[in-house]
Image (tube, coloured by chain):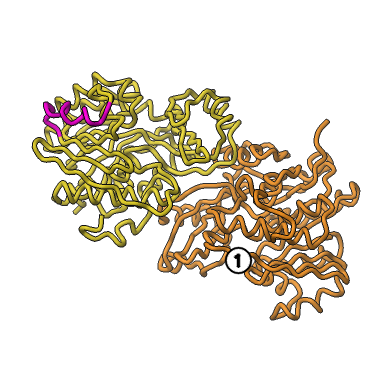
Chain colours: A yellow, B orange
Amino acid sequence: MTQKIQLLGISNAIVDILAHVDDAFLQSIGAPRGSMTLIDEPKAHEIYGRMGPATEMSGGSVANTVAGFANLGGAASYIGKVRNDQLGAIFQHDMRSLGVDVRLEPARGGAPTARSHVLISSDGQRTMQTYLGACTELAVGDINPRTVGTPEVILLEGYVWDIPEGPALAAEAIRIARQVSARVALSLSDSFCVERHRDAFVAAVRDGVDIVFADEDEVMALVGVDSFEQVLPSIEDFDNLFVMTRSAQGSVVVNGDETVVQKSIAVDELIDTTGAGDAYTAGFLYGWAHNESLAECARLGTWCATRVIQQVGARLERGVLDGYRRGDA
Amino acid sequence: MTQKIQLLGISNAIVDILAHVDDAFLQSIGAPRGSMTLIDEPKAHEIYGRMGPATEMSGGSVANTVAGFANLGGAASYIGKVRNDQLGAIFQHDMRSLGVDVRLEPARGGAPTARSHVLISSDGQRTMQTYLGACTELAVGDINPRTVGTPEVILLEGYVWDIPEGPALAAEAIRIARQVSARVALSLSDSFCVERHRDAFVAAVRDGVDIVFADEDEVMALVGVDSFEQVLPSIEDFDNLFVMTRSAQGSVVVNGDETVVQKSIAVDELIDTTGAGDAYTAGFLYGWAHNESLAECARLGTWCATRVIQQVGARLERGVLDGYRRGDA
C-alpha cells in the first residue's frame, strides 16, 4: 500500500548555479540587486560564460518547500518539467532521494533543464537570472487525475503563471483539487511576479486558492498597499488563510477572525537567507498536515526558516527537527 | 602577447557530487570510511540512486590546485578530459572563469564526464567513490608540444597512473618538460594510489620528477616505512624537493641538505578538510613560481590550506590572500 500523499507541489523545476559576484558584475549584466529576472538561452550562456566558479544544487521555490516537507518526514509528490539531461537527472535525483514521488518523467526533447544563476553579493544578497528552459513546456495535459492523485494540499507557486500554459494548468490543478477535496495553497514567489500577474492572482485567491503564502512585499503588491499595516484591513474581505513572513519581524497568520503573530528567532550567524520563505512554508504545511494549531504551524515554520538561514543553500538539511521542542520557537 | 604560463596541471577532470551520509550507508555500499575507490558506471548509478540530495562542484585533486593557483593570481593552464555534456561544461566553465587556459576541447563521444561521489560523514570525514568516465580516454596524443606549451612547472597527480595511457602520457609530459626546461611536480594523490603504482612512482621520482607533494601516509607508502620519523633518512638518497604535509602537525620541506619545518595554523572552526593538500600545493607552487624561499613557500601553502578548511568545498574562494602577511603564518 502506498503512503497517502500530504503535499503535492506543482512548480518550475530549476537547478541553481551559485557564485559570488561584486556589484560591478551585476551592473555589467544590467541586473538590479536582489531582483529575479527571466532570461533567454543566449543571455544564460552569456552570463554563465562571464560569471566565476560556481556550485550547482537543485532549487526552485516550491520545489525547495516540497524537498523540505519530505525532509521533515512528510509524504510529498511533485510535478515539474525537466529534460533528460544531466541537470534534469540531478533535479530528479535530489527529489527522489528524499522520498518525493516525482510524477513526470524527463522530456526526451525540447529545451534543456532550467537553471537559475544565483549571484551572491558580499552581504549575502542574491540576484537571480533564471532561464526557464524545460519548465516552459509544462502543459495542462501534465496536470490530470493520474499525476495529481489525491493529496491533502496542492501547492502552486506564482512563477507558474510565467510559463505559457501556467494559468491554464493552475486552473486545472484547482479544478482537480475540488474533485479530490484537496486544499490549494499558493506561494506568491516574489513581488515582481505579483506585479506581473496581480489580477490573475487576486482572481485565484478569491476563487480556488485556500492558503496564501507571502512575504510582506508580496502581500502588499497583491492587495495594492504601501505598508504592512495596511495589509491587515485589506485582507479582511478575503476568505483565505494568509501566512505572511516578515524576515526579522517574524510572521503573521490570519484566518478570518484568528490572528497569530509569531516572533522570529535570533540567530548567532546568518549565513544565507535563500530559501527562508520556502523552508517556513515547508514547516508550516508540515504542522498543518498534522492538524497542529496555527500557532504551532507558525512556530514550526519559523524553526525551519531559522535553520535554513544558518546553512549554505536553500534546501533544509537532514535533522532539521533536532532540538525542536514545542514552545522553544 | 599571451601571458607566460607558470603552472600546467595534467590530471583527472572530475565533478564532485557531495552528500552527507551515515556509517550504515558506507557499510551498505562496502566503502571503507575515508577511502577513495574507483567504480564503474553501473556502480556509479547504483550509488547515486541510493544517496541523498547532493551538491555538485568541480573537483579533482590537481585540478583543485590549478584552480587555486589561478585564484591566487598565477598564470595556469590545464590538460584533462571531459565529455561535451553538462557536467563537462561545468568543469570547463569553472576553470576558464578563473583565467585557466583549458587546453583540450570536450570529447564529442565516449564516456560521460567523470564524477566523484563524495560521501561526507558527520565528523567531516570523506569517502569517495569515483567513476572516471571520460578521464580514462585521456591519451598520449593529448600531450604534445602544442598542448603543453612552455610552462615553468608541470604538475601531475598519482591518479593519472590509474588511467590506461596514464603511465605513457606521464612519461611524454616528462619528456616534453625536459625539452622546454620545465620542472615536473608529482602530487601522490592518496596512499592507496601509491600502493597501486609504487614502483612506477619511485622510478618517476628517481628520473624525471623534480618535486614531490605528499601527505605523510603517501610518502611513507612511497618509501615503504611505517612512521614519519623513518621517512627523513629514507629520502636522503633521492635528489628531489620533497614537500610533505602532516595535517595539524604542519609540513616538512626537504631539499637536499635544507629542511624547513612549518607549523600549522590553529583554526577556530574546521568546516571541511577536503582540498587542504591541494590548496597547500597551490600556495607552495605560487610562492615557488615567484622565487620565494622554501620557508615562504611553506608558509603560503599553509595559509591556503588553513583557508580552505574553513570553507565548504575543496577549491579556494576568492580573496584567499586577504590578511596574508609575511610572518603571520
Tell me which corner region of the image, top left, top right, bottom left or bottom right, holds residue B273.
bottom right
- Which one is in front, B213 or B269? B269
Image position, residue B320 (x, y; %)? 64, 49
In the picture, measured across the screen, residue A119 lies left or right of residue B289, that is left
* Residue A184 shows in this picture: yes
- Which one is in front, A95 or A18? A18
Tell me which corner region of the image, top left, top right, bottom left or bottom right, holds residue B95.
top right
Q: Quadrant of the C terminus of chain A?
A: bottom left
- The residue lying at 67 percent from left, 47 percent from top is B67
Image position, residue B270 (x, y; %)? 53, 62
- The residue lying at 81 percent from left, 63 percent from top is B204
Image position, residue B299 (x, y; %)? 73, 60
What chain letter is assigned to the residue under label 1? Answer: B
Residue A239 sits inside the magenta stretch: yes
Magenta part of the chain: A227-240
Image: B158 above or below A138: below
Mark 1, other Cα within 10 Å: few <14 / some 14–19 / many ≥20? few
